[in-house]
Amino acid sequence: MSMFYPFHERYGSGKSQNYLWYWLTPLKIEYDTDIADHTVKTNMIVSPIAAPMIFLAPLEIQDTLSHTWEAHTNVMSRMKEIGATFEQETAMGVKRHKVDTSLIYQDTDRRQVELMVYLAAYKDPKKEVLDPVRDLQRYSCPNLEQAGVVGSMTEQPTVFNVTTRNGSGEEVGIINIKHAALTSVQPSWKGPYFKGKYPSYCELSLSFRDLNPISKDSYPDDVAVLTIG
């Protein structure tokens, strides 16, 4: 069953179209390598392992996309650079000769999103504040063969399908990442502390990084509609 945070009566399934929610669906990831036609292909296999964790989105969302463009280098530009350097050295002048070249696209960084989540106690501070943070911290870590500092990694950390949806469960196109690694979980616990051990409030910063290469298809015009079940 999907868990809403906050989950008291004002919010939850079908309450308001004007609420925006982060849907974080935990996924198990495996890699399968095929060799066909003298080509090695690695396929990513993912499957849901738990119901979505659904957090109320704040008023501000940070979504980062960075591209690398570098000066185009070819034989002619390198010859011009050599000529400019030779001219400067022979003239013994203080002016520097610079060869300008056009920029050419090189690469795109994986998409990265920073999600801010605010958790507050309403009836049960453990379930409403502490437990969801602990779940996300565990999801972000790998399983080890044995407890302790020394151990062998046996499973990849859990990855997530990250989407934004309105109060009726309709997916909206603000954030839509099929497979995202949870790279950072940063809770800021706030008091008062119930029974001296459960925080009543938490400001939770989550960093996700897209596992797939970015292309124009990463930003579709339309998204599928899925109703909360």
Image: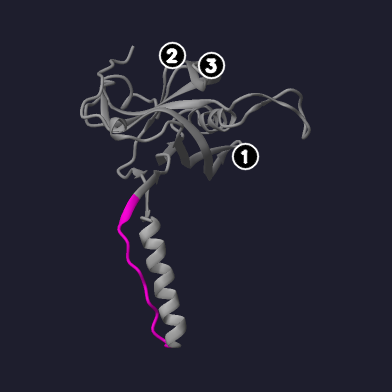
Residue 100 magenta-highlighted: yes
User: What amino acid type is highlighted by mark number 2?
Assistant: Met
> From the viewer's perspective, is 197 left or right of 16?
right
Q: How is the image coloured?
A: one colour
The quadrant of the picture occupied by the C terminus is top left
Mark 3 or 2, closer to the camera? 3
Mark 1 or 3, closer to the camera? 3
Q: Is 67 rendered above or below residue 17? A: below
User: What amino acid type is highlighted by mark number 1?
Assistant: Gly
The span shown in magenta is: 93-104
Q: Position of residue 193 (x, y in %)?
A: 56, 41
Nearest to the observer: residue 209 or residue 38: 38
Mark 2 or 1, closer to the camera? 2
Nearest to the observer: residue 128 or residue 113: 113
User: What amino acid type is highlighted by mark number 3?
Assistant: Asp
Q: Secondary structure at mark 3?
A: strand
Residue 65, by quadrant, is: top left
Q: Residue at x 37, y 62 (%)?
A: 77
Residue 38 magenta-highlighted: no
Q: Secondary structure at mark 2?
A: loop
Of label 3 and label 2, which has the lower sequence position? 2
The quadrant of the picture occupied by the N terminus is top left
Q: Residue at x 62, y 39 (%)?
A: 196
Q: Which residue is mark 1?
A: 196
Residue 1: assigned label: 2
Q: Which residue is mark 3?
A: 34
> From the viewer's perspective, is 217 left or right of 181?
left
Residue 21, by quadrant, is: top left
Q: What's the CA distance linking mark 1 and mark 3?
A: 54 Å
Q: Secondary structure of the magenta portion, mostly?
A: loop
